Amino acid sequence: MKNLIRCFACAMALAACLCAFTACSDHTTYNCEAYDFVAADGSVMNMLNMLNGLTLTLNKDGTCSLVVATPAGVESYGGTWKDQDGYIVTAINADWSMNLKKDGKTLTHTGAEIINGETGVSTVRFVKA
């Protein structure tokens, strides 16, 4: 019985440490759950079908990173971000700078984009990991 109580106490202490670590984390990570592109001709492309993953990390110091995983490899891009009037505004590079509308644990960017020579509008949605 004493061993069971000790195990329970250790498990509770470990859970408290994990919660404290998460609360004190110096960054927030978002995983892409949708990336759709609608071309001017009305055709729709699910861009996640071409990606293995897309992860946005916002650091408390105002820096950010975006990791793009494709079948060809993984690329990581660094930049900055700021919280501005209900949006997370990133400045990463010409391809990945975004104005992401905050809605709870979700960030959504909608903007003009050219993919495979086609002009259209993309919508990228990230969810807090």
Image (cartoon, rainbow, N blue to C red):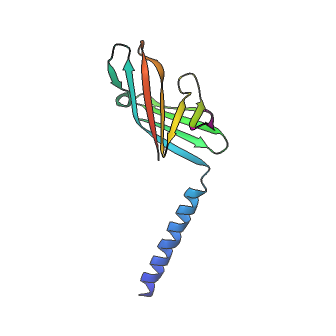
Count of picture labels:
0
Location of residue 93 in the rendering, given as x and y in whole percent from the top left corner: 58, 25
Residue sitting nearer the eye, 18 or 43? 43
Location of residue 30 in the rendering, given as x and y in whole percent from the top left corner: 49, 42
**Is 91 situated left or right of 46 in this image?**
right
Q: Residue at x 34, y 23 (%)?
A: 45
Residue 51 seen from this side: no
**Residue 80 sits inside the magenta stretch:** yes
Dominant secondary-structure state across the stretch colored magenta: strand
**Is 101 situated left or right of 4 in this image?**
right
Location of residue 68 in the rendering, given as x and y in whole percent from the top left corner: 48, 32
The quarter in which the N terminus is drawn is bottom left
Q: Residue at x 45, y 87 (%)?
A: 2
Residue sitting nearer the eye, 27 or 98? 98
Task: Read off the magenta span.
Answer: 79-86
Location of residue 109 in the rendering, given as x and y in whole percent from the top left corner: 49, 31
**Is 117 situated left or right of 65 in this image?**
left
Residue sitting nearer the eye, 60 or 101? 101
- Residue 35, picture quadrant: top left
**Is 91 situated left or right of 106 in this image?**
right
Q: Residue furthest left?
A: 43
- Residue 49, picture quadrant: top left
Reply above or below: 68 against 15. Answer: above
Q: Residue at x 57, y 21 (%)?
A: 94
Residue 68 seen from this side: yes
- Residue 89, picture quadrant: top right
Q: Residue furthest front?
A: 85
Q: Residue at x 53, y 27 (%)?
A: 96
**Residue 102 sits inside the magenta stretch:** no
Q: Residue furthest right?
A: 61
